[in-house]
Amino acid sequence: MDEAVGLLVDRLKHVVSRYGARSVLFVDYAGNRGLLTRVLPARFWRLLGASLVMHNLCDYSGLKALRLHYGSSYGRLPRDVLESRLIVYWGVNTAVSSIHSFQLALRARREAGAVIVNVDPRVSETARASDLHLRPKPGSDGYLALGVANYIIENGLYDREFVAKYTRGFSEFAAYASRFTLDVVSSVTGVDSRLIEEFASMYASLKPSIIHIGYGLQRRYGGGEIVRAIALLPALVGVHRGFYYSNTDGLPVDVDRLSGPTPRIVIPQSMLGEYISAGRAKLVFIHLTNPAATYPDAGKVRQGLLRDDVFVVVHETHWSDTALYADLVIPAPTYLEKEDFVYGYWHNYIIHNEKIVKPGFETITELELVRRISAGIGIDDSLLDSDPWDIVSSLIGEKLAGELKGKGYAALPYRSYSEYQTPSGMIEFYSTRAVEEGFNPLPQPGQALPDTGYSLILLSGAHPLYTHSQFEDVYGPIPPVVMISPEDAEERGISSGDVVRVYNERGSILMKARVSGSLPRGVVFVYRSASTLDGGRVNVLSDPGLDSFGGSVINSTRVEVERHAS
């Protein structure tokens, strides 16, 4: 380990002295959300002045969308699921990707008669377990949300007292929403107008309610606008923050103070391949993420990692795809082999993650590694060297830190549901912040996809056994399956079990076809970060572009599928 750390320090000194600190690129993400694993180690790279990635792959556009109208993105907590009469899963396969959340919904239905609704073009596991399923065409969800809003307003089903007391810009929104009649919305979305009416009436009458807004929903062109439209529905029916998206904003954990100064150069994750393949980074340090497998345009990511003039360091627990492209791999311990403090983005608890086993071989924790690098290049920072319990106490207070130490967990205080951080202090149907930032003050219904000449939209979602590319060491490769509708399969002469070529302008992969009535025409589906029959990853095809709000657009990827001549 001393040799590995010494080599990294020497190479880092060389690159900084010759090319400057900005030529160092620090790539991280949420493979672990611990304060000592993810948050504090990032501080070193910021103090160094390295370039960083902007975390735009997961929930970026949606977060910005919610903040335009609510001032902050936090919503309902887990306990509220049990008290809800209506639970809507919009653009998310919760039964697979958030099993713990879905169990609460099933319990609410079993014990209190709650109704579960799923909005998704695919007949997923969640759809099959729901009481009502709406199947809008991909990307038309904004029209559906605005159509529901118009029906509620037009029929006087909105909460007048709530709207008057807690919102601003209702009249402008109501006039705008009037364009989205049942006939218009049904025509655009493909959802029967009677089903839209049934859902809108149900949503207006069954309260309290929660809409779980899916991350996959906003990973497309116009995705941020879709989230805006959906998120305003609770305000119409009088439910404070009646959604769940990401609750980090509601927690009093000042991670920015731990993370350090704002970086000068930030690269969108979705454009990482373009950045490093162009040779703009001379040293790339990667941890808590597997970009060679999971980032868009993965072929370019791999090309960049293979450049002779780029020194790639990967700090990892397993031999991931990315580790195989590294010049230096430094072994990291798993969460079972180290102490940490972990907080979530759904619940409001902080947990003391205790070390329960010794590492099976020589490893170094993320915090200890940056401490040693920092000492090696002469960066002195008292916070990096602080005792972990002192750090936690400074973040959450001594009383909660004492509770955390005694019980292993502590409930963090959470912001009020009826508190809004907008300029007006109210929910803004007509967003003044949007105007300031150059966006339309009212949510737009959608955005046409770029015409690439490929006829099928490639959607992806979670497999029950995997978290992105994790757990392949347990269950084997993520199945190389592409699902296709019966209509599209027949048109192309494809049967279940056929080897097919899936391709676009970025690359080509071989997969095994599965004809499935769960998909609408014009859509194909793969498991997230799936392996391919020819030894690659499906992400070589993913669109690396940006939504107007800056988020990734991987669910706008267009492809073609054909039988492979073996």
Image (spheres, helix red, strand yellow):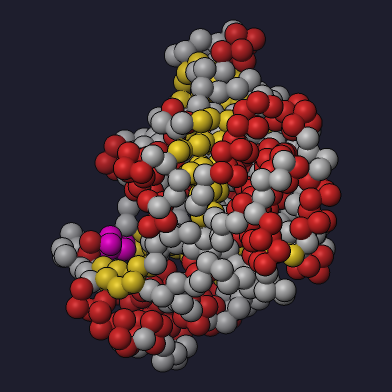
Please indicate, yes or no, whether residue 389 appears anywhere in the rendered image.
no
- Main SS, magenta residues: loop
Magenta span includes 513: no
Which of the 4 quarters of the picture holds residue 163? Answer: bottom right
Q: Residue at x 72, y 74 (%)?
A: 424
Q: Residue at x 49, y 66 (%)?
A: 248
Looking at the image, residue 241 lies above or below residue 486 = below
Looking at the image, residue 382 lies above or below residue 485 = below
Could you tell me residue 459's position as x and y percent?
A: 57, 34
Could you tell me residue 482's position as x and y percent?
A: 50, 25
Which of the 4 quarters of the picture holds residue 205? Answer: top right
Q: Please indicate whether residue 155 sits to the left or right of residue 388 in the image.
A: right
Looking at the image, residue 228 lies above or below residue 286 = above
Looking at the image, residue 395 lies above or below residue 70 = below
375 and 224: which one is in front? 224
Q: Residue at x 71, y 64 (%)?
A: 164
Could you tell me residue 324's position as x and y percent?
A: 41, 49
Q: How many marks?
A: 0
Please indicate, yes or no, whether residue 566 appears anywhere in the rendered image.
yes
- The N terminus lies in which quarter of the figure? bottom left
Could you tell me residue 49's position as x and y percent?
A: 58, 79
Q: Residue at x 65, y 54 (%)?
A: 159
In the image, the segment drawn in magenta is 331-335
